[in-house]
Image (tube, rainbow, N blue to C red):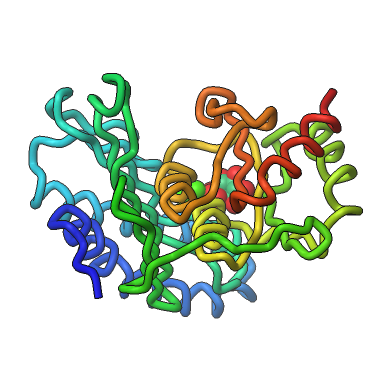
Amino acid sequence: MVAHSGLLTVMDRAARKAAPRLRRDFNEVQHLQVSRKGPADFVSMADKRAEQTLIEELRKARPDWRILAEEGGELPGDPDKPRFIVDPLDGTTNFLHGIPHFAIVIAVEDPNGAQGKPEITHGLVYQPLTDESFWAEKGRGAWLQDQRLRVSSRRDLSESLIATGIPFMGHGNFAEWSRIFGAVAPEVAGIRRLGSAALDLAWVAAGRFDGYWESDLKPWDVAAGMLLVKEAGGFVTDYRGQDMAMQRNQFLAANDGLHSKLHKLVANALR
Ligand code: IPD
Ligand code: CA
Ligand code: CA
């Protein structure tokens, strides 16, 4: 049994405070599918409400920290203190369609991390419908509740299950994604597009997926999940295998045994 730090407790509590309403709204949205106007406005309200609860809770505990939130943008605070990075609902399209796969995501970024550069130190991906809390602290491992997480031990691409995010209307690079898909799909046991980048990464950390690729994401989609994968013993790089995922906005995550095989496939496909 491991106790998380006080800060992680604050993050977990905030997510659990926002979750019941989000669960109720999700049940409601399933009934709205048949209405003519559709549930889109309703979901955007649910999203904003969840964010509001998260901000209130985080602000109560750390009043002088900045918060970067998907809906509200950058809320001011002390620039020398860490900042929260928040996605109140990752997997909006699933939520909108009544598909039970979405998460609340909170990360903490220290502006003065290793080598004086900003660094993600805490990450939480909370799935309200399963009550699963995936969390990681820099140097203290990745966890699902009180169970230590470790990336999968599969070494053969032919046995691996890989997650991805597929570009969609107005978003992403279709030609690039297709080339990667064309190179990876014939080599692996399966590809999944589940619709929440944060959960994709958390599930790589938990060994459910063996790898994952996607580009054109935002810090709130990936900050928590990247820390989870690394703390679970995996790697997250750009498509060339370099430690530049955030800078290049390309995310290639995998267990320690498969990462180099996967990045070679991807790099070749893009050459
Ligand atoms: C989206 C999800 C999805 C990814 C999209 C993101 P949202 O976040 O993480 O898996 O493919 O690019 O925008 O809009 O549901 O918060
Ligand atoms: Ca979102
Ligand atoms: Ca998101």
Task: Note whether 248 is above or below 34 in the view shown.
Answer: above
| Residue 61 appears in the rendering | yes
Count how many numbered circles sit on residues in the image: 0
- Which residue is more in the foreground, 162 or 77? 162
Asked where in the image residue 21 lies, by quadrant, the reply is bottom left
Frontmost residue, 134 versus 25:
134
Left/right placement of residue 65 relative to residue 44 reads left
Does the rendering let one see residue 37? no
Q: Residue at x 31, y 57 (%)?
A: 49
Q: Is residue 217 left or right of residue 154?
A: left
Which quadrant would the N terminus be assigned to in this image?
Answer: bottom left
Asked whether 220 or 35 is in front, the reply is 220
Q: What residue is at 58 percent from the left and 29 percent from the top? A: 249
User: x, y (%) of residue 259?
Assistant: 66, 45
Residue 74, percent across and down? 29, 31
Q: Position of residue 236 (x, y in %)?
A: 55, 41
Point out the image quarter for the C terminus. Answer: top right
Rendering quarter of residue 172: top right
Residue depicted at 34% across the width and 51% down the height = 123
- Which quadrant of the view contains residue 132? bottom left
**In this picture, is 41 found above or below 215?**
below
For image coordinates 48% across by 44% down, the residue present is: 222
